[in-house]
Image: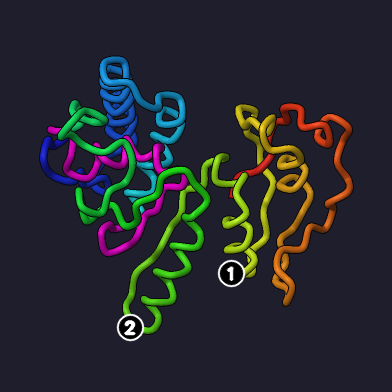
Amino acid sequence: MGESESVNLRDMTYDQLDQLAAELRASIVETVGRNGGHLASNLGVVELTIALHRVYDTPRDKLIFDVGHQCYAHKLLTGRADRFSTIRAQGGLSGYPSRGESPHDAFGTGHASTGVSAALGFARARDILGEASDIAVVLGDGALTGGETYEALNDAGHTVQAGRNRRADYGRHAGGGALVRGSPIRRTGHGTHRAQRNKRSPGQRSGKRAGMEGSL
C-alpha cells in the first residue's frame, strides 16, 4: 500500500485485495489501540470501503460516510496512510471526514444523519452544472436514528430495504427498529409516512434493545 498516494484498487487481484484488507485492519487495530477511537465500526466496513473505492473514482465521485467515524479505511486508501498514526492526536488527522484535510472527503459528517441530505445536494448541484459524477452514501445504523435521514429519503423518493445487523442499539431510541423493519418511506406531500407505525412489539414500545434489520 502506497504511503502518500491513493491506492489503485482496480488493477489488484482478489488475493491482493484480501491482503490489502488485512493490512488495513492491522493498521486500524494498532492505531486505535494507541490513540483511542472507533474500532469495531471501522473493522466492519473495511471490505465495503475497498469495494466502493474500486468502483467509484474519488474525488470526482463523492463518497459520504454517515456516521463519519467509519472513515478510517477510507483515509488509509486516499493518501493518508503515512499520517494515519496521528489520527485523533493533537495536530493529526481528524477522526471524521474533513474537507480541509483531503479532497477525497466530500462532506464533513460526524454524528449523524446528514449524509443523505448532503448527497441530494451534491446530486442536484451536479445536475444543474451538467457534470458527470456519482454520489454514494455509507449509512451506518447510527444515521438511522435521526429524522433528517428519513426526511432526505422521503425527498429522494426511496424505500428503506430490510437487512440484518445484530449490533444496532435502539435502547435509547424507542421504536427505531420497528420503523426501519416495517416502514417503507413514501414520497408524499406531508413528509415521512410510517406505514406500520403501530405494529411494534412490546419490547420495542418500551424502548428495549432491538436488533436492527436494515441496511440501505
Taking the spot 13% from the left edge, 33% from the top edge, the residue there is 82
| Rendering quarter of residue 92 | top left
Q: Which residue is mark 2?
A: 129
Helix, strand or loop at label 2? It is helix
Task: Work out how far the residue at label 1 is from the one at label 2, CA to CA, in angstroms.
Answer: 19 Å
Query: Can residue 77 be found in the magenta stretch?
Result: yes
Q: Count residues near mark 2 (Cα–Cα under 10 Å), then give few for <14, some for 14-19, many for 20+.
A: few
Taking depth in this image into account, of 199 and 17 the one nearest to the observer is 199
Taking depth in this image into account, of 2 and 194 the one nearest to the observer is 194
Q: Position of residue 32 (x, y in %)?
A: 31, 21
Instruction: Tell whether 193 sits left or right of 104.
Output: right
Helix, strand or loop at label 1? It is helix
Picture layout, residue 7 above or below residue 107: above
Q: Count residues near mark 1 (Cα–Cα under 10 Å), then give few for <14, some for 14-19, many for 20+.
A: some
Taking depth in this image into account, of 194 and 81 the one nearest to the observer is 194
Q: Which residue is mark 1?
A: 156
